[in-house]
């Protein structure tokens, strides 16, 4: 019959137990010639100790042997390895043997005398069963593992949602030194999701972005009363939040404050992924929201998002800001953005400004709106601004 399958590139291991040495030698030679790695035992106890110290893919055992025979071996082998198939050889199959064998899960019987083809065929089929059982076990374990990981992440995400709060970072206008608005930044007390990126990742993997977006917008609405009346609140939006009908509902908590809210959108997942993106954007504007392109210059958010979103505000990514006083190319790019924005009547905000040298260079390039640690770190209550 067919040649044996190979498990993970090693030869399948077969244990053969029989108390007749000549027969044992014939079986071993036959199976070795068919590619098996064969070990032999001359009685039950020897076979058992080999099973305890080694791992086999198939066991072939005589039923009647001194000490104890194949049926006892069968009973113990499955306590070590439930997947190992056992082929029993017997000259005279009795009802007792057959019943015991079925109780303990025998793979098949070989009635002595049998041909070497019959032996090889029985072992090959046992091997197939072995592989199938292993496959099934792995699949079951894989599913269980994935399920428990999913459960753990889901619990962490619930805890993050329950403990979600927003900190505020001012966006300042250099000309009149007024606070133009505050960006609301998501924080949670869930330690296993230590930053907003981790919470967003979890939401994406769990398919729960809408819950997160709603949580953020509800928290943002609750903050409005604490803000100075002329300050805007900048709220980060995942592009897929646009696909959530809640955001367009006039009854949603944030809708009542829409005229004071700027929604920041990063083109992280392309906006094209949202069905009727442009119509939904228009609906947001009809509610009173303004739109900002977030992280402009950070790889993904290409200038084309300015064309797609027609924003009221553009936020220049801190990658372009960092060390700009000594980076002529960054200066040219920022200058280009400033020119573009002034022609379009869009407010350009420099994000992540950390040093006076960065600020002064940006002022010279025509930037009027600033956000960054130099001015204020995010925090509750309303952070004081250093000018
Ligand atoms: O992607 P977005 O622009 O929304 O992210 C703003 C993030 O940048 C927040 O996590 C905020 O804490 C951080 N941030 C704000 N100001 C500064 C800054 O001056 N320097 C640095 N390194 N990070 C900042
Ligand atoms: Mn932002």
Image (spheres, helix red, strand yellow):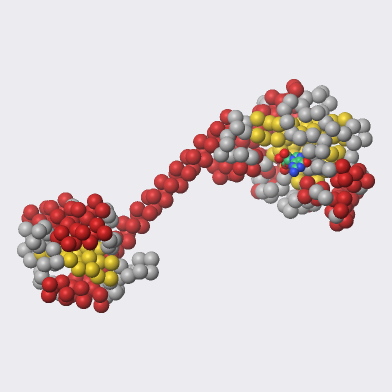
The answer to whether residue 286 is visible is no
* In the displayed structure image, the side of residue 166 where residue 77 appears, left or right: left
The residue at the point 90 percent across, 36 percent down is: 174
Give how far across and how far down residue 328 sits, in percent. Answer: 88, 56
Q: What is the quadrant of residue 264 in the picture?
A: top right
Give how far across and how far down residue 92 sits, in percent. Answer: 6, 63
* In the displayed structure image, the side of residue 214 where residue 100 appears, left or right: left
Which image quadrant: the C terminus? top right
Which image quadrant: the N terminus? bottom left
Q: What is the quadrant of residue 161 in the picture?
A: top right
Which of the pair 370/250 is nearer the observer? 370
Which of the pair 247/41 is nearer the observer? 41
Give how far across and how far down residue 152 sits, in percent. Answer: 49, 40
Q: Is residue 94 above or below residue 216?
A: below
Q: Is residue 84 above or below residue 151?
A: below
Q: Is residue 317 above or below residue 258?
A: below
The answer to whether residue 14 is visible is yes
The residue at the point 72 percent across, 52 percent down is: 300
The residue at the point 29 percent across, 74 percent down is: 35
User: Residue extending furthest top?
Assistant: 225
Give how far across and how far down residue 139 sits, in percent. Answer: 39, 53
The residue at the point 29 percent across, 61 percent down is: 55
Which of the pair 2/223 is nearer the observer? 223
């Amino acid at each position: 019959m067919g040649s044996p399958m190979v498990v993970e590139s090693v030869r399948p291991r077969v244990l053969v137990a029989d108390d007749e040495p000549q027969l044992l030698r014939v079986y071993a030679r036959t199976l070795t010639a068919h590619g098996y790695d064969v070990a032999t035992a001359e009685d039950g106890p020897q076979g058992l100790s080999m099973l305890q110290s080694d791992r086999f893919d198939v066991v072939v055992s005589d039923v009647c042997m001194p000490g104890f025979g194949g049926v006892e071996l069968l009973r113990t082998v499955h306590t070590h390895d439930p997947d190992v198939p056992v082929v029993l050889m017997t000259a005279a199959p009795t009802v007792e043997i057959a019943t015991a064998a079925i109780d303990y899960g025998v793979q098949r019987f070989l009635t002595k005398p049998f041909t070497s083809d019959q032996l090889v065929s029985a072992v090959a089929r046992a091997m197939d069963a072995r592989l199938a059982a292993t496959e099934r076990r792995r699949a079951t374990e894989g599913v269980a593992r994935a399920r428990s990981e999913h459960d753990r992440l889901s619990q962490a995400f619930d805890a993050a949602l329950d403990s979600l709060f927003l900190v505020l970072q001012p966006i300042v206008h250099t000309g009149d030194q007024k606070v133009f608005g505050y960006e609301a930044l998501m924080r949670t007390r869930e330690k296993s999701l230590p930053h907003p990126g981790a919470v967003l990742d979890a939401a994406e993997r769990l398919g729960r972005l809408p819950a997160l977006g709603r949580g953020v917008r509800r928290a943002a609405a609750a903050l409005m009363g604490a803000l100075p009346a002329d300050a805007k609140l900048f709220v980060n939006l995942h592009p897929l939040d646009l696909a959530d009908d809640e955001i367009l509902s006039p009854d949603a908590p944030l809708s009542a404050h829409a005229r004071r809210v700027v929604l920041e959108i990063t083109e992280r997942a392309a906006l094209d992924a949202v069905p009727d993106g442009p119509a939904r954007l228009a609906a947001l504007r009809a509610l009173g929201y303004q739109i900002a392109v977030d992280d402009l210059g950070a790889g993904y958010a290409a200038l084309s998002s300015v064309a797609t979103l027609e924003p009221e505000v553009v936020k220049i990514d801190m990658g372009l800001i960092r060390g700009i006083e000594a980076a002529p190319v960054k200066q040219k790019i920022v200058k280009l953005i400033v020119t573009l924005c002034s022609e379009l009547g869009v407010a350009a905000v420099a994000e992540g400004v950390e040093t006076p040298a960065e600020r002064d260079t940006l002022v010279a390039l025509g930037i009027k709106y600033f956000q960054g640690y130099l001015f204020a770190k995010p925090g509750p209550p309303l952070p004081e601004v250093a000018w």
